[in-house]
Image: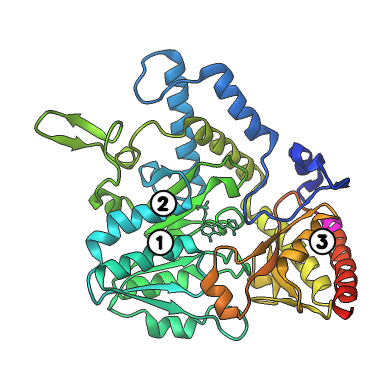
């Protein structure tokens, strides 16, 4: 058994008060909080060895290069990549998807081809593909949700065909927490000669993830959702694919030699990392990965499942709250989207904030999914390693209180 109370002590922000009440942070799907270890790594870099990487021969530059490349190695290990050459640092998951669209999609998708996504994609794994499809005369095809809130895998079997060039799906819905069967979709993609991209922005921070097990061709995620700083994302790609893809940005650091006549592109992974990268934040991201590795992702998943079971148990007893997506906690991550009948989710968010509870309300960058669900938006609570059952009890009590206030307003 992990000591989760001890974990909490590593997060100074959790001592904060909001509206005079202890902060209960349930907006982890938007971004996670950062432990002292990560905050200190940033401070240590700027206080002790701030320098540019890959170029200086001086001690500090060597230290910074080692720490930066060390973070890459740890990330490769964390997602079970075959080599750190397959790990490209980007600004966030969104930029990583755009690199695939720009550098792989533009050269491999033609008129009449099909791009398969799901009805629950975040705009980041939707808008770039929609634009590419428009530009190329290709077709976007959607795997819809089944009655039970899961993906309709029978439909996936029908939709993924030899016209499909890529299947691009989220590992976990940022709205409903729905966990996707990657092995199933990946093998359908590969059986039909298509590539397989996984948007791991919500999955990688919360679930054990192995790129070799899911056999995905690309995986993208953002470190700020997994204890790291903002400004660092990852594009994982199979080496043989990345090797064939042209760089997206040209300039310093992505070259191996330049003459007036010709530039030779650097090898992987640096050919995709033009210019001075986000050195401090990448180094601190390596520390975030260490933190998660020390906890063990199986334990992280088990803790969140425990919290989700508890929350679903209590919330399903509230008659006027509707919960979207799978109702079985075993099939979802620690993300619960709900609405109180007749109440705008923003009002719900505001009332909860008065009790010190931070949730997100709105469309969660999933407008097409909102349309499918027939709502303008939802209120969303999302959990992470430092949340406790006591916080969930408090949250559900606040929901009950909110219900009374809203009922009173509704009846007047
Ligand atoms: N994909 C998914 C599934 C996401 O949930 C998000 C961010 C992204 C991509 C984009 O990540 P970024 O780091 O590039 O911005 N999701 C959310 C959210 O649910 N609330 O705020 C951000």
Residue plotted at (47% across, 85% down) = 154
Residue 390 shown in magenta: yes
x and y percentages locating residue 288 in the rendered image: 60, 40
What SS does tag 2 mark?
helix
Quadrant position of ligand 1: bottom right
Q: Mark 3 or 1 closer to N-term? A: 1
Which of discs 3 and 1 lies nearer the camera? The answer is: 3
x and y percentages locating residue 285 in the rendered image: 55, 38
What SS does tag 1 mark?
loop
Residue plotted at (22% across, 60% down) = 107
x and y percentages locating residue 296 in the rendered image: 64, 49
What SS does tag 3 mark?
helix
Within 10 Å of the Cα at label 1, are there few (<14), some (14-19), or many (20+) other Cα atoms? Answer: many
The magenta segment is 388-392
Residue 216 has which mark? 1
In the displayed image of the protein, which residue is found farthest to the top?
Answer: 58
Examine the image and state in which quarter residue 216 appears: bottom left
Whether 81 is drawn above or below 254: the answer is below
Indicate if the residue with disc 2 has its beta carbon within 8 Å of ligand 1.
Answer: yes
């Amino acid at each position: 058994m992990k000591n989760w109370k001890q974990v909490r002590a590593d997060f100074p922000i959790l001592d904060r008060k909001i509206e005079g009440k202890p902060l209960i942070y349930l907006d982890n799907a938007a971004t996670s909080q950062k432990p002292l270890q990560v905050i200190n790594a940033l401070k240590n870099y700027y206080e002790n060895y701030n320098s540019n990487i890959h170029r200086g021969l001086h001690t500090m530059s060597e230290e910074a290069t080692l720490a930066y490349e060390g973070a890459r190695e740890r990330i490769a290990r964390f997602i079970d990549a075959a080599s750190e050459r397959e790990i490209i640092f980007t600004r966030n998951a969104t930029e990583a998807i755009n690199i695939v669209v720009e550098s792989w999609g533009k050269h491999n998708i033609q008129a009449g081809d099909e791009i398969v996504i799901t009805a629950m994609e975040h705009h980041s794994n939707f808008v770039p593909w929609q634009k590419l499809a428009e530009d190329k005369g290709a077709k976007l095809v959607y795997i819809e949700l089944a009655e039970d809130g899961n993906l309709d895998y029978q439909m996936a079997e029908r939709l993924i065909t030899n016209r499909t060039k890529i299947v691009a799906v989220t590992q976990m819905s940022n709205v409903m927490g729905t966990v996707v069967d990657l092995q199933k979709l990946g093998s359908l993609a590969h059986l039909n000669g298509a590539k397989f991209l996984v948007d791991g922005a919500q999955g990688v921070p919360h679930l054990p993830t192995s790129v070799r097990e899911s056999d995905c061709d690309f995986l993208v995620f953002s470190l700020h959702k997994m204890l790291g700083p903002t400004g660092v994302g990852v594009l994982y790609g199979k080496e043989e694919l990345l090797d064939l893809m042209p760089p997206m940005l040209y300039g310093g650091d992505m070259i191996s030699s330049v003459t007036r006549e010709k530039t030779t592109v650097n090898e992987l992974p640096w050919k995709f990392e033009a210019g001075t990268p986000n050195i401090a934040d990448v180094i601190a991201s390596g520390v975030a990965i260490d933190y998660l590795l020390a906890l063990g992702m199986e334990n992280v998943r088990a803790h969140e499942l425990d919290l989700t079971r508890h929350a679903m148990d209590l919330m399903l007893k509230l008659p006027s709250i509707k919960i979207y997506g799978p109702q079985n906690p075993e099939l979802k991550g620690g993300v619960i989207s709900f609405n109180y009948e007749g109440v705008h989710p923003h009002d719900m968010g505001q009332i909860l904030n008065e009790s010190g509870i931070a949730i997100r309300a709105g469309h969660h960058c999933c407008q097409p999914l909102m349309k499918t669900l027939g709502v303008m938006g939802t209120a969303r609570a999302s959990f992470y390693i430092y949340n406790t059952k006591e916080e969930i009890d408090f949250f559900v009590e606040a929901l009950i209180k909110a219900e009374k206030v809203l009922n009173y307003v509704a009846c007047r």
